[in-house]
Image (cartoon, grey):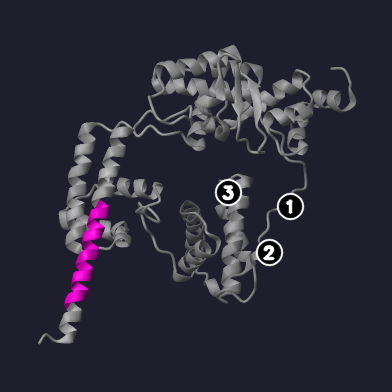
Amino acid sequence: MIDKHVIESIEWIETQLEQVGLTVKALEQAVADYLQWMESVGYSQKSRQNYQRQLDKFMRFVKQSRLDWDAIFKLQTLQRFKKVHAVSATHSITGLSRYLFRQKRISMPIEKKEYLLPKSYEDFLAHHQRSHGIAHQQIKRIKRVLAALDAYLQSHGINLSWLTIEQVDAFLVEFFAPFTSTTCKTYRSMIRGFLRYLYQERKIIKRNLAPLVVGAPMFGKAKPPKFLRPGEVQGVFAGLKLSSSKDIRTCAMVHIAYTLGLRPKEISRISLDDISFTKKELTLRARKGGNPIKLPLPDITIKAVAAYLIGVRPESKHRILFLSLKVPQGPLCPGVVGQYISQCMKAIHPSSTAYWLRHTYAQNLLEAGVSVYEIKEMLGHDSIEATRKYLHIHIKLMRKVLFDEKL
């Protein structure tokens, strides 16, 4: 008679093998879906074949290692695979993990570079994500800020349990130097959350430092928006090149930014359905202030957009206007849009940014006699105070708007 424990062991092994078989089948289906997606977005046949060869090796590795689904797309698993098969590049596997993450079939993609912070930092990140439902990308952003704090404390020999507000302030002064006030405000909030956790949840620090982390007081008015003078605007447009597909796409972006005063984020969200060439207008459905609006499209902007659509824009299932010119040819993010626009302006004004064209648009409206309230609607500002900043650009114009004086 077979021993009861032997039977239980056999059943356990059979269950594990069955589970491994289901995992391998799920992985095979995921790989097939990924390769099909690659074909649909324009990857070459050679690239797909190279990816498939490596993914086949990876599937065999997963089967031999008897990994469950949650363990497959971990950095440790990828490192073991690279060591076993003596490979350095694993773009196919990391690409597969990103695809499955976008499809919500795994909780997070394989990190490009995983670095562990001290336990109290990692515990905070896990607690913060669990209790607030924070997105993976936001957790990564918080982790970068905390990594900078940890590096600062270690370099100055500061123990976290004896942390003082003076030391936090000294770190913030050094860390915030290259960032805008808006970014500093966001990062300051992250630091507050960590300090609050150390005090309330872990009792690591003896005083709640979070309320003491505040921005520097503002003793004067906000700086007026920077804009381009007429001669500088002419210089920007004279310097636009049309020698490459990227140049033609950038030219269309610059025309939209200057003639419509749109933010890079708004430009990145324009879809083909938002443009009416017959009516010569653009519909902005999702604005920062949440107020949709229809804006007239000047002929010069229509021509620039048409040149991009006819000669450059790749065929795609995406309805977003501006797409990447490299596979997988997806929509451009706001940062990339702003970067391309800014590059065209650097020769005219080295410190300029894409927002200068938006400010120039507002200045032109003001000089044309458009009321501040109309400009507010056209710019999509939440409050009139944001628009009133433009009154400080030109003292004569300010006096005319405020006191109805003649220029």
Q: Which residue is drawn at the image coordinates 20% and 63% (left, top)?
A: 65
Q: Is residue 17 magenta?
A: yes
Amino acid type of the residue that numbered disc 3 sits on in the rendered structure: Ala
Q: Residues within 10 Å of mark 1 (few under 14, many from 20)?
A: few
Mostly what secondary structure, the magenta segment?
Answer: helix
| Mark nearer the N terminus (1 vs 3) | 3
Amino acid type of the residue that numbered disc 1 sits on in the rendered structure: Pro
Residue 55, given in percent of the width and then of the height, sits at 21, 48
Pointer 2 residue: 212
Which numbered dot is residue 217? 1
Amino acid type of the residue that numbered disc 2 sits on in the rendered structure: Leu
Residues under labels 3 and 2: Cα distance? Answer: 20 Å
Specify the farthest residue to the left: 1
Residue 390, given in percent of the width and then of the height, sits at 74, 30
Pointer 3 residue: 177
Q: Which residue is drawn at the image coordinates 43% and 16% (left, top)?
A: 310
Between 137 and 277, which is closer to the camera in this rendering? 277
Residue stretch rendered in magenta on the structure: 10-27
| Mark nearer the N terminus (3 vs 2) | 3
Between 271 and 241, which is closer to the camera in this rendering? 271
Q: Secondary structure at mark 1?
A: loop
Q: Secondary structure at mark 2?
A: helix
Residues under labels 1 and 2: Cα distance? Answer: 13 Å
Give the quadrant of residue 51: top left
